[in-house]
Amino acid sequence: MRTSSIKSSLFFSLLLFAAPACNGEKKRNTAPASPKKIFFTQPWNKTFHLRETETGEILSIGAVFGTAANVFVYDQAQGAVVTLDTSGKVVTTVQLSSIGRNSYAGDDFVMEDSVFVFLNGVDRRLEFFNRITGMHLRSVPIPADLLSGVQKRSQRIVNRLFLDDGRLMIGNEYRLVAFDGRLGKRIATAAAVSAAENERFVLYRKHRPVVMRDSLLFLRSIGATYRLPPTHYSITGKRFFTLGSRLFSIDAGKDSIRIAEVR
């Protein structure tokens, strides 16, 4: 009688011990973490390049710009724009004509209609290039007082260029103004846009901005939060673009370039 009671107690103890393990295993199997989508990856000096300047600076990727049909990557080391389709396949590479400073075209860029528009922060100009031939079309000076209303000197630096619903937005991660690239002046009827306190613009679109706060990225259109991906070599312009509701970043790694979905 006593032996039967001991066996029964032992059976129920083993059952209770096993139950959480089974439940945990079931949970892991039914809710696996979704894998990060790799959009493009390749060692350096195939499609994209590294170049060391006379001062020892390493040039790699300058910026990226995405549309619904293509992703454009500025290979700053070679002074060229590489076009990828939405599957990550290389479509074209367009060499930009020289404008007098080695292969430097600018710090950031967008693609507007049939031209690449570069923000040349060194000379405070917009540089326009033919999208197909890479020929330099014209330079448009950026007014010295474009961000004169900003109190902090560090936030008056002009180093960002966005395209919002067909309108050029020039400024930096903290403040942007609408700009007419043909007339070379600020659009007076459009109010300047400022990031919220303790935030910076990563991608600016009036209704779908991506901002950064405390090293976290906020994609407000879908209410998502992401960690800031690392990059080995610095990228002077935009590192991020969206395809639909998904956010992607470019990483200028030590041995290779990688474009991947941000998680």
Image (spheres, rainbow, N blue to C red):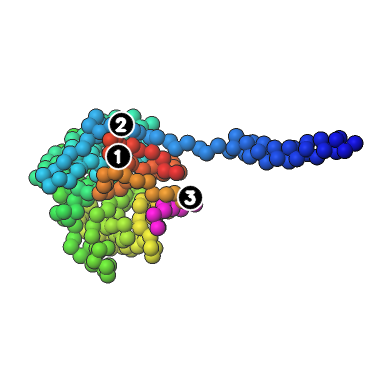
- Residue 106 position, x and y percent, is 19, 48
Distance from Cα at disc 3 to Cα at disc 2: 28 Å
Q: Earlier in the sequence, mark 2 or mark 1?
A: 2
- Residues shaded magenta: 213-224
Q: Is residue 190 visible?
A: no
**Furthest residue to the front?**
2
Residue 234 image offset from top left, x and y in percent:
26, 47
Q: Earlier in the sequence, mark 1 or mark 3?
A: 3
Amino acid type, mark 3: Ala
- The mark total stands at 3
The residue positioned 35% from the left and 62% from the top of the image is 194
Q: Earlier in the sequence, mark 3 or mark 2?
A: 2
Pointer 3 residue: 224
Among all residues in the image, which is located at the extreme left?
100
In depth, the one of 130 and 91 nearer the eye is 91
**Residue 155 sits in quarter:** bottom left
Q: Badge 3: how crowded within 10 Å, few (<14), some, or many (20+)?
A: some
Q: To which residue does mark 1 refer?
A: 253
Q: Quadrant of residue 200?
A: bottom left
In the picture of the structure, the residue carrying the numbered disc 2 is 42
- What is the CA distance from the residue labelled 2 to the residue labelled 1? 10 Å
